[in-house]
Every structure is written in structure tokens, then in C-alpha cells.
Image (tube, coloured by chain):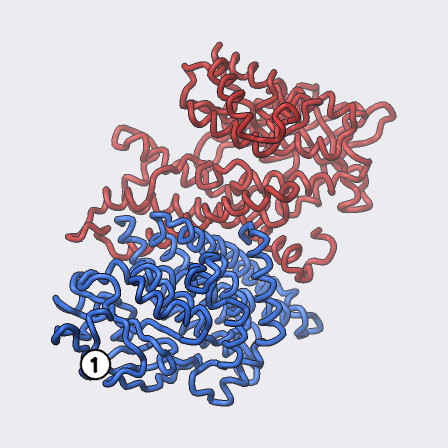
Amino acid sequence: MADFGGDPEAFRAEARTWLEANFPKSLKGKSVSYVEDENPDGADMKAWIDAMGEKGWGVPTWPKAYGGGGLTPAEARVLQSEMNRIGAFNPIGGMGTMMFGPTLLEYGTEAQKQQHIRAIARQEVRWCQGFSEPGAGSDLASLQTKAEDKGDHYLVNGQKVWTSGGQWADMCFCLVRTDNTKKHEGISFLLIDMHDPGVEVRPIQLIAGASPFCETFFTDVKVPKENLVGPLNGGWTIAKRLLQHERNGIGGGGSGGGAAGIFGVGGSPAAMAKSYIGVDDKGRIADSDVRSRVVAHEMDAKAFQLTAFRMMVEAKSNQGPSAATSILKNAGTKVGSDRAELIIEVMGTQGLGWEGEAFKPDELTAVRGWLGGKATTIFGGSFEIQNNIISKRILGLPDPLGPSSN
Amino acid sequence: MAVLTEEQSMLRDAARTWTQEKSPVSAFRKMRDSGAPLGYDPAAFNEMAEMGWTGVIIPEEYGGSDFGYLSLGLVLEELGRTLTASPLLATALASASALILGGTAAQKEAWLPKIASGEAVATLAIEEGPHHAPEKVALAATKSGSGYTLSGKKTFVLEGLGAALLIVSARTSGKPGDKDGITLFLVPGGAKGVTRTALKLADSRGAAIVSFEGVEVGADAVLGEEGKGWDLLEKVLDRARAGLAAEMLGSAIQAFETTLDYLKTRVQFGQVIGSFQALQHRAAKMFTDLELARSCVEAALTAIDNDSPDVPELVSLAKAKVGDTLHLVSNEMVQMHGGIGMTDAHDAGFYLKRARAAEATFGGQAYHRDRYARINGY
């Protein structure tokens, strides 16, 4: 930002003044999730979304020309710290900001960027991801949803699954098959309007109860040709890039929240063990076996935090997420699921409650979080797929499946 | 890798070049085969001193460069890669820290310039049993005239055979296990009544058992305050542990890289064994653990440089995590190499033996997990 001569501290005063003037006090300490929840409502929330959307600060480092904030990474960190200071939060989010926007900025045409990026920056359009299919999970490239060239449009037929927030989405960035004779080179990256005729969304009930995940069915959906991103049959490259952004977000390298916090399993297992199990005469967790495992876990969690922080610092001098984010995804989700398991265990039968008066709200949340958290080592590329990626891309070991798993 | 200053990058590069060219693992093998009495090659240590590595944490007024602990950690990491045996950790890190943190002007003047130049090797003499327990001090220091008489025995004294200066933990009051009543003494290695015996360990380094029989020292031999040595000793040990953790990280990285090379070249069933997913996922876990361990080691060294209050917590985290990682990687190195990894002609055994000795030094994983828990009130 030329106005501030590159000194992020010079930017602090402007950020502080603007936030004080525009952040509604009634929203202090609140937050929004465009992954797990419906769009938020309320006049103050709308005003805050509009103000941040207008300013472009919901996507602070995106270019101003497309509605972003145009800030340097250092200025964006100043903005975040100023928001933290007054209990403010970023009301712009979801898959558009986390995955699709950065990808479109890299691969989209000028017209596509003009059409979609500003709308994401202003939280006007909510996006969902149409990648996985019933027969294409870890082997994503075996997807079968097809898009046929009908001259002035593509005709899309098929089924997607695990469409997070599909029931609330306006648009879907979708992988479709445009050539049956090739695997990876027969996939295209297509943008589909979720309100179009022929699109049907059904929420999925999970082991943890209600979920944001859906099945999405496409039946003779007509998609304009300008909605193709990148070359025809060139969607796999774009998809891989987008998945890097996704892993970065899940592992915690991007936003800092990380998998440990995604599913609402809060609290420290050590503190909970002391309260549910008790302490010995030296004030230690009374069950020595539980204590050993709690301590080992707390140390793993600390090591993960330090690693996420280190990678953030190191990334300042590099460009975008790298293959190294695969480490963060596995390390972060492992810590998160270990934590959830320990919390359930130390709570005893209070950690098994499904519903009812016998349980405190925190206890019920922990149970649902433990079950919901099982998804973290499956989605976004399973734990095993991440290990394949580390083996192949970072360690340079040969691909046991040959080029088909690429 | 932490973001380094230009000077730190240069220091790291110099250490890497020197270890690769002058002190590869074959140099350690040669030293072991020669039965070198001190457990290291004095000529190689002289070269290290000439490059200034013995003065990295020592203030400029005492002949050092005052570059800090992260910088010295970079050197130790490179030494760890090639298993370079040297007194650098014992003298230029542990003992120099003790003098910097607890020494009088006269004590610093007497020893720091000699440590910085490599002329003198100093070491800590603090262990009395098979497990790291720095508060279990029985070695007695009794008042005699204006000074003290030391009687007792220390074991697992690193570089104990050749050290010119021993920094000895002794009991001036209380009983073994008490943190009060511990006093640190500076005792010349050649003092009357000091007997040193080689403690021949699997890692072929220069550890010793040191006996003190009526050793007379003056009042000016007390490092810090009489009876209040515990806090100083903990600070010194945390610095030594963090430096050792850096060395262990280097050993673990090299053990991993050597093993990874083998996975890419060893052919069985008509393909390189690195194409088998069972081995790939174990390699991926090791790589992940190494990245996590590096974060802990760098955080601990940085905290020491910043004199941060969370030094003890971060040091125990680093020593435990890097200990677990080196333990795993050194075992996998032997296992994945198969039969050749069992032979003395291969380097895998060196990494395995050094791993266990380094793990046990200044507290193993169990010690540091418990300490981490105590610090955090678990």
C-alpha cells in the first residue's frame, strides 16, 4: 500500500480508527462460520458485513482491483491484531475466501475475476465445493459427473457428496468429466449455479447428528460456457492447487485456528482430568496412566502450535502454501482427534451423553465434537493420502500406484 | 528452519562445509578404531576453536563473539549430522553458561578466555546414579579452614578424562534429593585427590567416572552462592539440554536422510523398496516428527536468547520431542537397512548408539515429560 510507505505500523492507526468507527459493539466476541452454519442475520451483522465488504478487508491481501483490501501480509497481521484488541472478527469467509478465490485469482480470466472475486469479497455469494463423489473419495480423479458440450452450454449430469454447506450455497466450484478416455486429463473445472433447475441438495445425517454436509444431484443442468475455469480438460491442475489451499486452512497454517478447534472440542484435557478424576497428594492427576498420556498429548499439541507458527513465519518470505502444508494437516488433525478422545475418556460416562438433563452443555458438545472430529482425518485428503503426498512430493519416493494416482 | 540472520547463515554454512569435508562419519569411525583416549580428535577440536565455535555464546570481553544460543545450536546440529565427537557441548556451551550466569569477575577472567580459545576444556560433573537426577547430590563439601573439602564420586562426566576444569555439584547441607544445600564448585581436573577412570560407553565418547577423595578447594572455588546452587544448575542444564537437542536433531535428520537414500536405491522383488507403501508411511511419519521436533528445538534456543520465562518448559519439550524422534529414526535406520544395518561396517549402528547416549544425557524423555508436567501443574 503505497500510502503507508510499506511500514505496517503506520497502518495501525488507520485500522484502529476505522474499526472503532465501523465495528458494531453489540457483536463483540461473536464470530461466524460459513462452513457449519447458515448465513448470519441481524441488522448489526449485516452492517458489519457490508462495511468490511466495501472496505475489502475481509480478504485483506487480495488485489484492490477486484474488491480486496490490497494490504501487504504485514498490514493484514496488524489488521487482525487490531480486530483482536476490540473483540472484532472477520465477517467475510467460507469456501469462497479460503479456497476458490485464491485459485480463481491465479487461474481465472479477467472477466471471471471481475464477475466473482468482488462478490466473494463482499460476502454476496456463498460457494460450495463439488469435488467428491460416491465412487470418488481418496481417488478423486476417478470422478464421473459429466459435462457434455452442447454448443452454447455444457449439460451436467451426476452426483456429488460431502458438499459442505451445499444447502446454503449460491454457487458451486465443481470438477466434471469432459473426456472419458483419459483420467486426470479428462477433468474440467466448472462453476455451477446452485439455484439452477436440475440441482437438488439433500443434507446428510452423520454419526454426530445433523451436519453441514450434503449430497448434491445434477440432472440436465445447463451451465454457460463462460463458467469453465482454465482450459477444457485442464481442471486437475487447478484442483490440486485448490486442495493445497484447503489443506492449509484445515491444518491451521492459514488461519491459525487449526483442526484442533474446528469441531468445538475446547478445554484442556489436563485441566479436565484434574477435575473429573482428581489429584494425588502432590497435586498431580491421580491416575498415573491417564496423566502420562495427557502430558504426552499436551506436548504434542504444543509442538504442533510451534510448528504452525514457524511455518507462518517462514512463509512470509515465500509464495503461497507449499507441499509442506501436508505435514500440518496430519499433525494438526492428529492432535485434534487425540484431544477429543482424551477429553471423552477423562469425563467417564459424563463423556458419553447424547442428550438430556444429566449432562452439562459442555459435556454434550464434547461428545458431538469427538464424533464430528473423526471427519478431520478423512476429508481434505485422508491421513493416508497425506502420507502418500509427503512420500511422493517431499521425500521423492516412487508412486506405488504409478501415474494414475497423481 | 528458523529465519536466520546473515551471520547465522554464514556460521551454519561454514559448519556444514567443515563437517562434510573434514569431519564426516568416517572420521568418527577412525577416531573410534584408533582408541583415541579422550573420545575425540584434539586436532579436529583445535580447528573448531580456530573457527570461533568455542566462543559463540561467550561475551566479547572474554574473547567470544556473543552470537547466542540459536547460533551455537546451528553448529551443534551440523556436528550431530556427522556424529562429530567433540567437547564443544560440555565446554563451550554447558560450562561457559555456568561461568557466564554464575561466575564472579575473577572466575570469568580465569576461565572464559581459555574456553573461548579452546585452550581449556571444562565440563559439568553432576551425575551420581544411572538416571539423570541433578538434585540427588551426595558428594559432600565440608568446610575446612577458609575453604572446603570435597569427597564423593561423580559418574557419566562428559569429556571427564581430559577436562581441565570440573564444575562439580556438591552438598553443603541437607540430604540427597533436597534442592536446598547444593553448591557448585570449580575444581581443576588435575587437583590433588581427583581420580578419573574411563567410562567406556557404547557411543565411544570420552565419558568418565571422577572420584573426589579429600579434595581441598578455596572459598573462591564456589560458583554462585553456597547452598543455593540449584537454581543456577537448572539454568545451566537447560542451556546444555537445548544445545544437545540441536545436536540430536542433526543426528536424526542425517539418520533419516541416509535411510531415505537407501529406500531409493535398494532393490528387492524387482523394485526399489521405497516404492512399498508400508515403508513410505513410516518415512512420512519420521519426516513429520522431524519437522515438529525442529520447531521445539528452535523455540527453546530462541527462548534462551530472549531470556524468556518459558525456557524450562520449552527446553523439556524440545529434549523430549527430539529424544522420541531420534529414538524412532535410529531404530528405523537399522530396521530399514536390514542385514547391512546390523554390521559394524555400516554407520547405522553409530547413530543408534549415539542416540541412546544422547537421550540419557541431561535427562531422557521420561524425565522431561514429567518435568513438563510439573512445570504446568498436570
Q: Secondary structure at mark 1?
A: strand
Chain identifier for the blue-coloured part of the image:
B
Residue A122: image location, x then y, percent: 61, 19
Q: Which residue is mark 1?
A: B215
Tell me the amino acid under the disc marked 1.
Answer: Val
Whether residue B212 sits left or right of residue A222 in the image: it is left
Q: Nearer the viewer, residue A293 or A59?
A: A59
Label 1 is found on which chain of the structure?
A: B
> In this view of the protein, can residue A103 be seen by the observer?
yes
Q: Residue furthest top?
A: A43
Say if residue A215 shows up in the picture: no
Q: Is residue A164 above or below residue B84?
A: above
Which percent across, then down, holds residue B107? 31, 67
> Looking at the image, which residue sits at the far right?
A151
A37 or A218: nearer the eye? A37
Residue sitting at x 60%, y 39%: A246
The image shows a total of numbered marks equal to 1
A247 w.r.t. A25: above or below: below
Q: Chain A is shown in which shade?
A: red
Q: Quadrant of the N terminus of chain B?
A: bottom right
Q: Is residue B138 left or right of residue A68?
A: left
